[in-house]
Image (cartoon, rainbow, N blue to C red):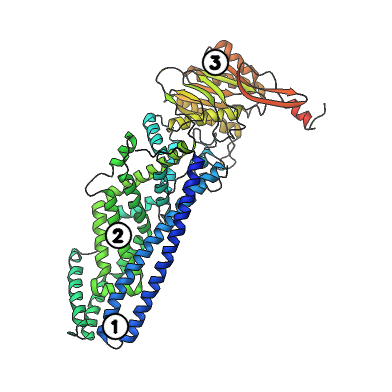
Amino acid sequence: MSEKNKETPLEFYTQELEKYRQQLGQLKKKLAVSATLRLVIFLMIVAGCYYGYPNVQIVTSVCVVGVIVFIFLVTRHSNLGYQKKKLQALIDCNQLELNVIENDWSGLDTGAAFIDPIHPYSHDIDLFGERSFFQYLNRTVTAAGKNALASLLTSNSITLIKEKQDAVRELGGLAKWRQSFGATASLVHVTTTVPVILQWMQNYKAFIPKIMQILPKIISAISIVALGLLIFGVISFNVFLLWFAVGLLITGVYLKKINKLYTHAGQVKDTFDQYHKLVALIEEKQFTTSLLLEKQALFNGTPQASKVLKEFASILNDFDQRNNMLFGVVANGLFLWDLHQSYRIEKWITKHHKSVAAWFEVIAFFDAYSSLGNYFFNHPTYVFPKLVKEGPTLDAKQLGHPLLNPKKRVDNDILIDPAQFLIITGANMAGKSTFLRTIALQLVMSNIGLPICAVSCSYKPIKLFTSMRTSDSLTDDASYFFSELTQLKRIVDALEQDNYFIILDEILKGTNSTDKAEGSRKFVERLIGTRATGIIATHDLSLCQIETTFPEVQNRFFDAQIINDELYFDYTFKKGICQNMNASFLLKKMGIVSG
């Protein structure tokens, strides 16, 4: 079910921000009262022990009752603390969106780690890095989710696009659910990556003997009886102390391995403590689209995945209580606490470790797709491309680049048929490269199910391959020209395996003009021979002559005009060949050369 959000994104985030700030103020007051109560109970325990001494029965009773009440208050305070952290995360979430609306992206991850110069298109179109599309899009809050989002953008997959669109559209309408999911996920303080967690569970070797399934229960029952006998004076404190030492001795036999297990458990505790909440949010939501239902179904089972993960989180939290030295000593002496929790951990890992990988992948999927849904919510006027099996490869009206200022951006129409090639000419700074990146990004966005910055769009899905930004590599002893040839060879090889939309920007820049013209022409002819679809931008007007030989080729241009001794660009995509170049004018205008 979609949440009804009639407000604009700006109105929604502003209202949510104010609401959560008010709730946080009220919660801080509850936390102050809770802290005072804990202090009062602690002082009462100290006073009871002081005035009850040397009466063992009174001191023991005060300690037992006081510790139980104190633990209850600590747990309650911890829950309130968690609520505070989540409210703060929700506040940060809405403030971040307001900042982005104001064009402040400083709080967003650039995705620089995913920059790959040899990827078929990501480096050419600034998919990752500072002020990149990934930075603008990304709202993931888990490392696995961030990796999943990057994988979506670079997968070059054209399958299930309609299903992806439906999923993005549905998640876009679930703004409050997405924020709750993101806030919950943001509270995961990961010290160990998911692959390391999965590897640890996969390779774990059990060391607790099976007798520990019942021995801690027997020891605990005897300890409770002994404690009662001590309180009522039936046995002496020395006898009770002797029994206590027996428990410590049993635990000590396995202490080294228990400590090692505790180290690993401590590293994964927070992850499971929060992931079971994320799974519960997914399980409880009534999705309607096929892709979301398919992922949600991976949690189905008896018991539910969230309950299974919550059980493990509870075990890990119980095990972590040993970190409190006083509790650890008492609990191990009377209840074999460490052995009992270690056995529970090993039993859970043996039973469920094979399912954990799939569950974690679903969490990463929803984390990644929440970013896509958020993008759709933030751009309600954008359109989902209409997918077609016949007709033009791309027919978009008023297509624009989503990262450009809409007040200054000039949108253009683009129509290109299958196996058609457009040759674009134009003056320097007239908008050729920006237009190429706009089309390339539109293809990537369309293939992952995102709406695009256009009035309308009809699209026949196709994979993308570009050659727009090639650099030499001194460490690989590769010249610029060789690097460019290598990329062109990849394009040719790729076309032998599949159909691609090819985008080229001024190819063969590393050679002389005559050689460049001849080589560019032959390469375009090679692409036409493979029935590739695409666009090439060039300053070489001789390349435009191909149009007279091949009906698949059409010429387009971006113009520049000199009006009142000033250079003027309209950034409008036109039919034909550019006749106005501006290099000489700019050299004179800037005083680099004389008239």
Task: State whether residue 293 is above or below residue 274.
Answer: above
Distance Cα–Cα, label 1 vs label 3: 95 Å
Residue shown at 35%/71% (left/top)?
Answer: 324
Q: Quadrant of the C terminus?
A: top right
Question: Is 32 positioned to the left or the right of 275 in the image?
Answer: right
Three-letter code for the amino acid on which mark 1 is drawn = Val
Three-letter code for the amino acid on which mark 2 is drawn = Ser
The picture places residue 543, in percent across and down from the top left corner, at 61, 18
The picture places residue 212, in percent across and down from the top left corner, at 20, 66
Q: Which mark's residue is nearer the viewer, 3 or 2? A: 2
Q: Is residue 461 visible?
A: no
Distance Cα–Cα, label 2 vs label 1: 31 Å
Residue pointed to by mark 1: 59
Q: Residues within 10 Å of mark 3 (few under 14, many from 20)?
A: many
Three-letter code for the amino acid on which mark 3 is drawn = Val
- First in sequence: mark 3 or mark 2? 2
The picture places residue 448, in percent across and down from the top left corner, at 43, 33
Q: Residue 314's mark?
A: 2
- First in sequence: mark 1 or mark 3? 1
Question: Is residue 96 or residue 189 the one in the foreground?
Answer: 96
**Element class at badge 1:** helix
